[in-house]
Amino acid sequence: MSLFADRPRLIHGALALFALAVIGRAAKVQLLDADRWRARAHDQQVAAAPLPAPRGAIQDAGGEVLVESREMVRLRVAPREVREPRQLAALMRRALVGDEWVRRSTDTAYKWVEVPGLYLPTDVAMLTALRGVHPEPVLNRVAPPSEGLRRIIGRTADGGVPVDGVELALDGLLRGQPGRDARVRDSRGRLFDSPSVDGDAARPGHRVTLTINAGLQDIAERSLADAVTAQGASGGDIVVLDARSGEVRAMASRRADPRSTAATALTEPYEPGSTLKPFIAAWLLGHGRARVDDVVNGHNGTWVLDGRTIRDDHKGASFTLADVIRYSSNIGIIQFAQRLSPREQFEVLRDAGFGAPTGVTYPSESPGRLSTPSRWSRQTAASLAMGYEVLVTPMQLATAYAAIANGGELLQPALVREVRAPDGRVVYRHERQVVRRLMTSETARTMRALLKGVTESGTAAGTSLATFEVAGKTGTAQVARDRHYVRGEYTASFVGMFPADDPQVVILVKLDSPRKSIYGGKAAAPVSKTVLEAAIAARDAALDRRSLASAPQRAAAAPPADEPVRDAAEDSVVVTESAGSVPYEVALDHPPRPSRVVAGARAVPAVQGLSRRAAARVLHRAGFRVVFRDGAPSGQWPAAGTMAVSGSRVTVAVAP
């Protein structure tokens, strides 16, 4: 009886325990595990997809966009979800999807198909609206327009991962912050937008403005390509540096090896040869160890030193220091360098920036090589004086010459002018940065005068322009490979400053293993002249035209470059041009017409009927300036075939 009497209590107790267990479980689920279950419910009800962040655009100094991200779509198809296979196939073919992938996308034997390639969203908008098609937004980085720019800016792999160049160096600023797209899912798996579900918008990266001038970069790249082809060289580099601010205006590199993708002006050092001689001379002049008219023995072009035969191409019984620079005398510079101790000679080159990276914004810049005196041999001092047993990059050498050009200050070169946040706020702006004073302004002025002699009557004679003088130094160095110098292999180079008296830019041209001529004065110096002529002719090539207008010009019988060649008896016309942002008018007494033949002139090419870009390119290559005039009957003045001096202006009228 007691067992039956206790049964209700047992049942009530079991029910109470069950109720307590349910309450405890509910409390655990709703209180302790609430976040976990809420997240699981959210995952079942909300479909989220990542939104890639647009990488920041990279533009040139004038605001022209060089590289930017473009939204693309990657197609993924679930054939078993497709309701309208015929429509799907038709739309895929319209989007130029290959037949094999169209067949797979409509074959239910496949569970999931990833269609290769990227597509513009507008081209596949109807396709992505079909059931069973799962688009994935992808941001594709549009490559820079030229090889030289690609070497500077660098490349990105799939997913916007930077590989090299500025893209890699500034990845933290360029990459932005990804977002998230969220939509609700019903019981059948269909997706709907809902105001109760918020996604996270992607935040784009910062916008980077380079110091590169796109117009001058194009000129440098074309000139380098033409020179490499004409000289049969294996490659080359051109660096154009603003001597006053240290900003890199152009940097072109070219190599025969397709695996070479870097800006070799920063990554591949070389033995500079005679272009190093001015720094020895500058130190001697600045410290009172030598004067411009000091004389050393020229040994008639052949001198044996410590069992080593030193030769000069320009033979002489004696040379002044000015002659040593003008004629690039190895024998002379070695004797002048003997006035320095090994430590002083090392410090001369070290202070010029050799043996250390310049600090430009690039991930793989080479420091070059400059050994300390403790590792020198008996012949190292002589080798260094001639520009051997030291490795420098073209950027290091151009930066060192900029110190001579700007009055003696060694500047840190800059490749990035400005960085702006997505909201337009400036987070970085380049300011002129002086590394050290390399020489006094007086010494720099003296060196510019000596280097002007190189282009007037020395190893680079003829490099100056029709109206402006150029100062510079040539270099011809034998190429070393596997610790031995290769017979017949040379590096020809020239470093120039324009204009000579108050330089705006330093231009370095280097050609690797030229076949037509091994000498810097014959192979490299003419390239710098071509670049400068085209830069003067172009409107947007980063030159200060106001300074050029006030700079002293070369005395010549030919008319100035600003005026077309014309005869004396002609009618009147007015040509409007722009100098910087200030328009001005040049009144010509008479309308241009074919001129008489002038000594040293060349024929004006025919450009009538060409596009503006094509006409400018043809005239620039021919060495002429170009002015376009709208609203007049089409034509050109001087007419095609007219003999005009290099640097003259050609007016091209474009019909309305």
Image (spheres, grey):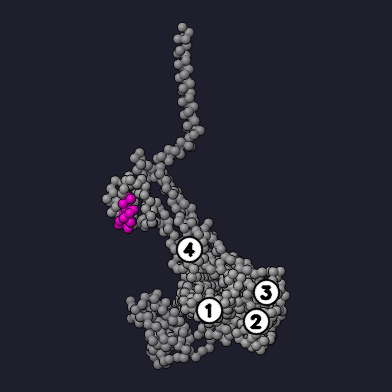
| Label pair 4/2, CB-CB below 8 angstroms | no
| Label pair 3/1, CB-CB below 8 angstroms | no
> Residue 615, image x and y in percent?
39, 78
Left or right? Give the position of 359 relative to 372.
Answer: left
Tell me the magenta residue range.
92-105
Query: Which of marks 1 and 3 precedes in the sequence?
Result: 3
Disc 4 and disc 3: Cα gap in Å? 44 Å
Residue 486 visible in the current orientation: yes
Q: Which residue is mark 3?
A: 380
At 48% across and 56% down in the image, what residue appears?
161
Task: Identify which residue, 1 or 197, lies in the foreground.
Answer: 1
Query: Which of marks 2 and 4 precedes in the sequence?
Result: 4
How many marks the image carries: the answer is 4
Point out the image quarter for the C terminus.
bottom left
Q: Which residue is mark 1?
A: 524
Query: Which of marks 2 and 3 precedes in the sequence?
Result: 2
Determine the secondary structure under disc 1: loop
Q: Which residue is mark 2?
A: 310
| Label pair 1/4, CB-CB below 8 angstroms | no
* Residue type, label 2: Ile
